[in-house]
Image: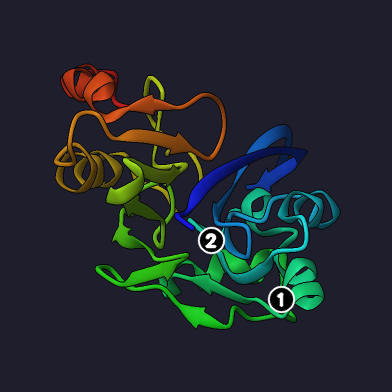
Amino acid sequence: MAARIDHLVTSGTFSLDGGTWDVDNNVWIVGNDDEAIVIDAAHDADAILTALGGRTLRAIICTHAHNDHIDAAPALASRTGARIHLHPADLPLWKMTHPDTAPDAELADGQVLTIAGTDLRVLHTPGHAPGAVCLHAPELGAVFTGDTLFQGGPGATGRSFSDFPTIVGSIRERLLTLPPGTRVLTGHGDPTTIGAEAPHLDEWIARGH
C-alpha cells in the first residue's frame, strides 16, 4: 500500500532566549496502514499515538531542535521503540530541552529515509537553526519544511542560533529548485507550494527578516 500523509495539530509553548510563546504545531505522519514515521513530535505524545492508530512507528524525524518541535519526542520514542533522528548541528538546542536524553541517530544531507516504499530525501537547510532539515518526498509531491519555509516567507531568524542570509541561501539553493507544484508542508500554519513562494525571494531579501 502506497504511503499517505496524515496531519495533526498540537498546541503548547515555544521557549528561547528568555521568552515563551503559545504555539500550534503541525505534526506530519507519513506511512501506510501498517507503518509510519512522525515528522516533528510536538507537545502531545498521546495525541500522536492516537493519530498513529496502532501503526508501527519506524522513526521520529526532527526538522530542527527548537523545543516546540521535539518536546514530545522522548516520550513517543519510549512508548513505541522508534528511534529519534536529528541533524548533529542542532544538538546544542536539543540539550536545552532534553539535557539527559540524546537522539538515537544523525540526519545527514542527501540521506534517504524510506517508509512504506516511499523515499524522503534529507535536505540540510540551516538558517532558522544550524541543523534544520527539510524532507523532500518526490513521489508524494511534497516537501516537509519545518520552520525553514512558510506560506509568505522564511522562518524566523531573530533569535539565537539563527541567521537570515543563511536561511535565504538554503531556501534559494535547496527548496526553490524543487518542482513548482511541490507542496510545502510547514511546521506551523497552512501549506503552500514552491511555485507560490519562489517569485517573492527578492521581497524577502529586501525585508531582511
Q: Residues within 10 Å of mark 2 (few under 14, many from 20)?
A: many
Using the image, determine if residue 66 lies above or below residue 150.
below
Choose between 3 and 138: the one closer to the eye: 3
Tell me, yes or no, if residue 156 can be seen here: no
Q: Residue furthest front?
A: 1
Is disc 2 placed on a helix, strand or loop? loop
Using the image, determine if residue 101 lies above or below residue 109.
below
Asked where in the image residue 141 lies, by quadrant, the reply is top left
Residue 163, image x, y percentages: 34, 45
Mark 2 residue type: Cys
Would you name the residue on which mark 1 appears? 99
Choose between 75 and 206: the one closer to the eye: 75
Which quarter of the rendering shows the C terminus? top left
Q: Nearer the viewer, mark 1 or mark 2?
A: 2
Using the image, determine if residue 128 lies above or below residue 104.
above
**In screen coordinates, is 117 left or right of 7?**
left
Inter-mark Cα distance, 1 to 2:
16 Å
**In screen coordinates, is 7 left or right of 12?**
left
Tell me, yes or no, if residue 53 can be seen here: yes
Residue 135, image x, y percentages: 37, 54
Asked where in the image residue 98 lies, by quadrant, the reply is bottom right
Residue 9, image x, y percentages: 69, 36
Query: Residue at the location (48% across, 66% down)?
Result: 90
Asked where in the image residue 124 lies, by quadrant, the reply is bottom left
Counting residues from the start of the chain, the first of labels 1 and 2 encountered is: 2
Would you name the residue on which mark 2 appears? 62
**In screen coordinates, is 120 left or right of 104?**
left
Query: Residue at the location (58% across, 62% down)?
Result: 36
